[in-house]
Image (spheres, helix red, strand yellow):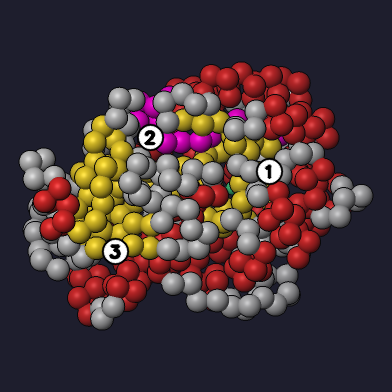
Amino acid sequence: ASLLWFDPDADHPCHRFESDGLLATARDADGVQRVVAIGDWATLRRQFPDVPVADRRGQLIAPGFIDLHIHYPQTDVIGSPAEGLLPWLERYTFPHEARFADAAYAGEVARFFWDELQRQGVTTALVFATSHPVSVDALLGEAEARGLRCIAGKVLQDRHSPDGVRDHTEQSLQDTEALLTRWHGRARLGYAITPRFAPSCSDAQMQGAGALAKRYPDVWLQSHVAENVDEVRWVRTLYPHDRSYLAVYGRFGLLRERAVYAHGIYLDADDWALLADTRAAVAVSPTSNLFLGSGFFDYAAARAAGVRLGLASDVGGGMSFSPFATMRAAYTVARAGVRGDGAAKTAVSLSPFDLWWQHTAGAAQALGLAGVVGSLAVGSEADFVVLDPAATPLLARRTAQAESLAQWLFALVMLADDRAVREVHIAGAAPTHSAARPQHARNM
Ligand code: GUN
Ligand code: FE
């Protein structure tokens, strides 16, 4: 097969490619499959002459994709039209999330959710559950059974939320601590303290979340920030004494390593500096930002400040579980010369290496998991996809016409979908998805 992988530690897209390569993996004592060697076929075949080899000529092996922000209970909210974020939350999202108090329902959706993510080539995700503790158990229980790497948390929302999803301050913090004790570090799983967003959390709940974030420094933290102009205006009235929306999170101790904030469209230079200083990361969610009409992410500002970022679907604000759909939307959003509130931004053209990196090794760095997933570097966990560059007539035509690796990968970014995802290998378990299509081996 041809191979695409990344330097796990470089703070910019640093790719490696082998047109005739070999990926060698082995199961460790902990049951997790890890990369033993990756490189050119001839050299590695001499090094490992006796191991069984699966021939994937004509296919591309790449790291499994990482979705840096997604709501599993919004699987059935995709495509609900509304006049922007806040009406969408009130009309569709909150009423639907109320159903996740039912463990059986949550379990059914969790199974569909993982089936769909795996089918699309996503092997690691940072996930919002709902405010109901059973919704976390359903999701992480399913991930554990599949050997997946997943980080998730119970949503905290004790105000400005309707009956059915609104939680109680004290109980919500006790539930959070019980869940993180149960799940964090078990199998390949992690826990994320999850204040929904500043408007939905009282000062006491924010303070409690900050205290837990301090007491458990290796637990993750996730929320939303500066997504929509009406939301930003609302936060200004709720927190008139804070310098900015982001600064509210800082005041409560919620900006730190392993904290991931979705969106971050309406941030200023001081906010970018605050993110960089605290080493908090941003989950760029371009299909969601387009669907909800939220705005266009400012890559130039984020990059100038050196803020860590990665790509995310934000389903169900986002429209697709496909990492290719997300990469396409990211390219489009980066090309825009405006932000969405009248402010200008610098348009940039993201390379296919950059887009791919933001959804794999870059996202892993944002999670503090560099070298663990997302790169296929030696020693890392062997979550990977096998892609067919000839999966559809147009994709086959455009990849065949490519005169450089960049053109070839760009054709995949722009034209691939689930039909190109031939196999998905999960390091924690035997292969769980193999598309039932005939294998037609081709030489590159
Ligand atoms: N802000 C607070 N909650 C949500 C949510 O569920 N989706 C999005 N896109 N933004 C939010
Ligand atoms: Fe979200």
User: Is the CB of the residue bearing disc 2 within 8 angstroms of ligand 2?
Assistant: no
Q: Left or right of 40: which side holds 304?
A: right
User: What residue is shown at x 61% (from left), y 51% (from top)?
Assistant: 281
Residue farthest along the right direction in this orientation: 241
> What is the quadrant of residue 34 in the picture?
top left
- Quarter assignment of residue 113: top left
The question of residue 308 being in magenta is answered with: no
Q: CA distance from mark 3 to mark 2?
A: 26 Å
Eye-nearest disc, 3 or 2: 3
Is any part of residue 50 visible from this angle? yes
Name the kind of residue labelled 3 in the image: Phe
Q: Residues within 10 Å of mark 1 (few under 14, many from 20)?
A: many
Counting residues from the start of the chain, the first of labels 3 and 2 encountered is: 3
Amino acid carrying mark 1 in the image = Arg
Residue 173 % position (x, y): 70, 24
Above or below, comparing residue 175 to residue 204 in the picture: above
Q: Residue at x 8, y 45 (%)?
A: 49
Q: Between residues 217 and 192, which one lies in front from this camera angle? A: 217
Q: Is mark 3 within 8 Å of ligand 2?
A: no
Q: Residues within 10 Å of mark 3 (few under 14, many from 20)?
A: some
Between 51 and 171, the one lying in front of the other is 51
The percent coordinates of residue 25 (x first, y second) are 24, 41
Vertical position of residue 305 compared to residue 170: above or below: below
Disc sitting over residue 17 in the figure: 3
Query: Which kind of residue does numbered mark 2 sit on?
Result: Leu
Identify the disc placed on residue 256: 1
